[in-house]
Image (tube, rainbow, N blue to C red):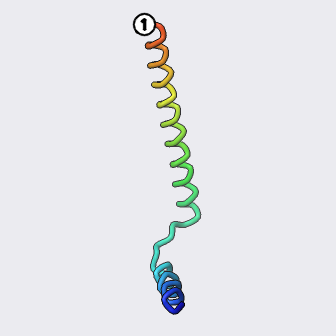
Amino acid sequence: MMKLINYIKDTKGELKHVSWPTRRQAIVFTALVIIISLFTAALLGFFDFSFSYLLENFVL
């Protein structure tokens, strides 16, 4: 049980050393991740549609 208590105390101490982002940075980085994810999804969807179209109409 003492190991668990020491672990929690050590973890709490380490969290004080972490350099946390500001609220604005967190919002900007979150928006950036969402935008990049949507762009990547659209790009992959475009390639999927294109290859499916090519296979259906020209190969098969």
Name the quadrant containing residue 17. bottom left
Q: From what the image shows, is residue 46 above or below residue 24?
A: above
The furthest residue to the front: 1
In the image, what residue occupies the spot 46% across and 75% down? Answer: 18
Quadrant location, the C terminus? top left
Q: From what the image shows, is residue 35 above or below residue 49?
A: below
For mark 1, what is the residue?
58
The tally of labels here is: 1
In the image, what residue occupies the spot 53% across and 84% down? Answer: 8
In the image, what residue occupies the spot 48% across and 30% down? Answer: 43
Name the quadrant containing residue 22. bottom right
In the image, what residue occupies the spot 48% across and 25% down? Answer: 48
Residue 35 at x, y percent in the picture: 54, 43
Horizontal side, residue 23 vs residue 10: left or right: right
Q: From what the image shows, is residue 54 above or below residue 17?
A: above
Residue 50 at x, y percent in the picture: 47, 19
Report helix, strand or loop for mark 1.
Answer: helix
Residue 45 at x, y percent in the picture: 51, 28
Q: Determine crowd level at label 1: few under 14, some 14-19, many 20+ residues with C-alpha closer than 10 A.
A: few
User: Tag 1: residue type?
Assistant: Phe
Residue 49 at x, y percent in the picture: 50, 21
Q: From what the image shows, is residue 6 above or below residue 34?
A: below
Quadrant location, the N terminus? bottom right
